[in-house]
Image (cartoon, rainbow, N blue to C red):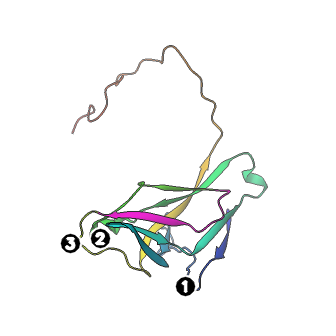
């Protein structure tokens, strides 16, 4: 089991939680909201994290990934960077910036679940520059080339 140490930075901060046991990610609640530009809102979680890697995770790169909830469509908001990566050595407050692209729809408020987190684990990668890559049936065809 991966352990994550949490520091509450404000009184109303809530530890991320799962609503259902088999949920893949942990819901996060906003403790603050600041309009940083017209229709652009920065929400703070009031939390700082530290991943306790233990012995079995040595040599791996880790992060906390923040992603929007599936119900975001009800708000008219879009997470500014689609998925936010919190590097494991960051110790400040985790926050997320959303564009309110449909102002006629409600935006998130303090106390709302605004996103979810999961632990990301990455093995070290070695890149190798090559003159050619092995051929495949798909080749270099992209963007919808596999059908509807």
Mark 2 or 3, which is nearer the eye? 3
Q: Secondary structure at mark 3?
A: loop
**Distance CA(mark 2)–CA(mark 3):** 9 Å
> Which residue: 27% across, 67% down?
76
At 21% from the left edge and 39% from the top edge, which residue is drawn? 148
Q: Which residue is mark 1?
A: 12
Q: Position of residue 106 (x, y in %)?
A: 28, 75
Gap in angstroms between the C-alphas marked 1 and 3: 28 Å
Q: Tell me the number on the disc at residue 104.
A: 3
Describe residue 110's horizontal placement relative to residue 129 as left or right. left
Q: Which residues are the magenta region?
A: 88-100
Q: How many marks?
A: 3
Q: Which residue is mark 2?
A: 75
Q: Sort mark 1 into few (<14), some (14-19) or many (20+) by Cα contacts within 10 Å.
A: some
Decide which of 7, 42 is in the foreground and name it.
42
Q: Residue furthest front?
A: 37
Residue 15 lies in quadrant: bottom right
Report whether 55 appears left or right of 44: right
Q: Earlier in the sequence, mark 1 or mark 3?
A: 1
**Marks 1/2: CA–CA distance:** 23 Å
The image's mark for residue 99 is: none
Q: Residues within 10 Å of mark 2 (few under 14, many from 20)?
A: some
Q: Height in image: 142 above or below 72?
A: above
Residue at image coords 68%, 57%:
89
- Name the image quarter holding residue 107: bottom left
């Amino acid at each position: 089991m991966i352990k994550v140490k949490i520091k509450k930075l404000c009184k109303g901060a809530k530890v991320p939680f799962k609503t259902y046991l088999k949920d893949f990610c942990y819901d996060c609640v906003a403790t603050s909201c600041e309009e940083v530009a017209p229709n652009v809102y920065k929400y703070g979680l009031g939390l700082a994290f530290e991943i306790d890697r233990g012995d079995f995770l040595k040599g791996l790169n880790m992060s906390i990934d923040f992603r929007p909830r599936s119900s975001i469509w009800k708000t008219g908001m879009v997470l500014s960077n689609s998925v936010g990566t919190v590097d494991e050595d960051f110790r400040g407050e985790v926050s997320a910036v959303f564009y309110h692209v449909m102002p006629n729809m409600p935006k998130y408020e303090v106390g709302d679940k605004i996103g979810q987190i999961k632990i990301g684990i990455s093995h070290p990668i070695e890149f190798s520059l090559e003159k050619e890559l092995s051929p495949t049936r798909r080749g270099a065809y992209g963007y919808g080339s596999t059908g509807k």
